[in-house]
Image (tube, coloured by chain):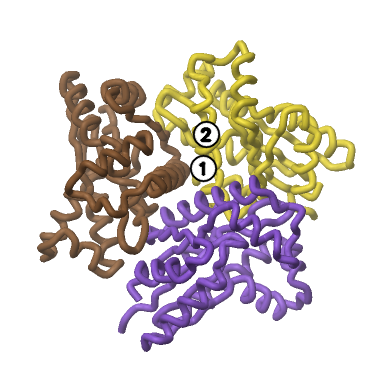
Chain colours: A brown, B purple, C yellow
Amino acid sequence: MAESKKIIMVGIPGVGKTTLLSKIVEYVKGHQKSISVISVGTLMFELAKENGLKDRDDLRKLPISKQQELQKIAAKKIASHTEDVVIIDTHAFISSPEGYYPGLPEYVLKIIKPSNFISVSAKPEEIYSRRMTDATRNRDKNTLANVKKELDIQSGMISACAVLTGSPLKMVLNREGKVDEAAEKIIQSLGL
Amino acid sequence: MAESKKIIMVGIPGVGKTTLLSKIVEYVKGHQKSISVISVGTLMFELAKENGLKDRDDLRKLPISKQQELQKIAAKKIASHTEDVVIIDTHAFISSPEGYYPGLPEYVLKIIKPSNFISVSAKPEEIYSRRMTDATRNRDKNTLANVKKELDIQSGMISACAVLTGSPLKMVLNREGKVDEAAEKIIQSLGL
Amino acid sequence: MAESKKIIMVGIPGVGKTTLLSKIVEYVKGHQKSISVISVGTLMFELAKENGLKDRDDLRKLPISKQQELQKIAAKKIASHTEDVVIIDTHAFISSPEGYYPGLPEYVLKIIKPSNFISVSAKPEEIYSRRMTDATRNRDKNTLANVKKELDIQSGMISACAVLTGSPLKMVLNREGKVDEAAEKIIQSLGL
């Protein structure tokens, strides 16, 4: 029995991860392989609702120990998936009032045991302007300096994740108008 | 009983951490909360003196195993504090002839279990000129390239610390003449 | 009995690590100390041959669990060396189709217990042109942007290694025509 590949894919808001993901799913489905994409944010919120929460923002207000417990339950759910390809759609960190919350702390990585990391980036200027045209975002905090800092921290945190697990890290630059190129690089790197 | 918040604050020499710290302490004291600030360097030296050392520089000359033992004793002392807010004043690394010594190795983090990381930086040019006017420093090794490298390593090491613990990382730029602004950002991020 | 110093030395292809290494070995041998230099790549391939592999490239095609087993056997061999100075010639990561494979994952570091890290870098332009004139390399993938990205990831991964072990990290810039200067910095940092 072939092992299930657990692929962790991260990218700060505005790099174009969602479009990339749909390209990859489309490709894998056309090649007789089973695939599932798990959004960690959505999974965490579903678990929180089972625990009585109503609003997504209330997650962060739980005691740290409770949040970590939910993170571990989510990680166990992810680890139990058996599809040929399991893509874990998440973030190296989540921006919050407390700062950058690691999306992949060690205790989560030890449960998921990812086989690959994909870190998506884009030119800071492109990220900046995508965020500027997105009405759902807080545009006040959108500065080019912030975008660059976030790309740096993403790179530092995901490097630490690779060292902790020993799994390879593919860094993909998603260039404006070249999403097919970026998707192809990811597909090749995964040997799909 | 509310938990004691353990806040690790790092910054390379010249970022202006000491001034920032005194602003934060002043604020917290004005808000009916207990606070203690622990300088890890001073604590380590006190422990070393109890072990017969006379000069601060002799610390580094102890066998590595002895140094690590002292680091763990210091970490346990820090972990035992019960004030509402415990600020751990330390460095992501200490520059030494052997290179950058991690100030927060994994075995220390696992004991302290910090709730937050604050990483203070400043413009490289400002750090450079503050170091140049500080008579107590070795000005020979002060180059702009070195300052930039140190900021990079601080960012890489503290990102690894966040991944190891799962605790949020607030990065604060301490701009010349804007120390109140930087202090306010930290106070907000800590929910104080 | 003096402890055996285990020194991990990394550098991306083109930084000039091999020349640096021979300078250091020459120096140490002239100072009545025993030294061994272990190339992790060569050691891994020898172990793989004992396990029936014929081609170096087949290493990567083994199941991940088998590769990690070989990595751990290699790490144990390295840890068992007792020379005064043991230099472990390796990489923070190896570029592969799957991305950047960490050369020093946590489970390897915990076995080797390195006393020092040396991270060699060079100006991106110099690395780029050295790679361009090296006929054995894939020059198609040699771009200045790639070289800069690799230097960034090397720095991020090796910073994580330092945090995991608590061992000091010396970063050395190997400047064109100044290899003796770089070698001297390393020798001083190791107290040899």
Chain under disc 1: C
User: Is there CB contact under 8 Å for labels 2 and 1?
Assistant: yes
Q: Looking at numbered disc 1 in the image, what kind of residue is underneath it?
A: Met
Q: Residues within 10 Å of mark 2 (few under 14, many from 20)?
A: many
Pinpoint residue C54: horizontal percent, then vertical percent.
53, 15
Nearer to us in this view, A14 or B75: A14
Occupied quadrant, residue B45: bottom right
The residue depicted at 43 percent of the width and 56 percent of the height is: B162
Pinpoint residue C41: horizontal percent, then vertical percent.
59, 27
Mark 1 lies on residue: C157
Labels in figure, total: 2
- Camera sees residue C144: yes
Disc number placed over residue C93 in the picture, else none: 2
Could you give the CA–CA distance between mark 2 and mark 1, rounded to whole angstroms?
8 Å
The residue depicted at 48 percent of the width and 19 percent of the height is: C141
Point out the image quarter for the C terminus of chain A. Answer: top left
Q: Is residue B133 above or below residue C70?
A: below
Nearer to us in this view, A92 or A73: A92
Q: Is residue A162 above or below residue B84?
A: above
The residue depicted at 77 percent of the width and 32 percent of the height is: C179
- Camera sees residue A158: no
Q: Looking at numbered disc 2 in the image, what kind of residue is underneath it?
A: Phe
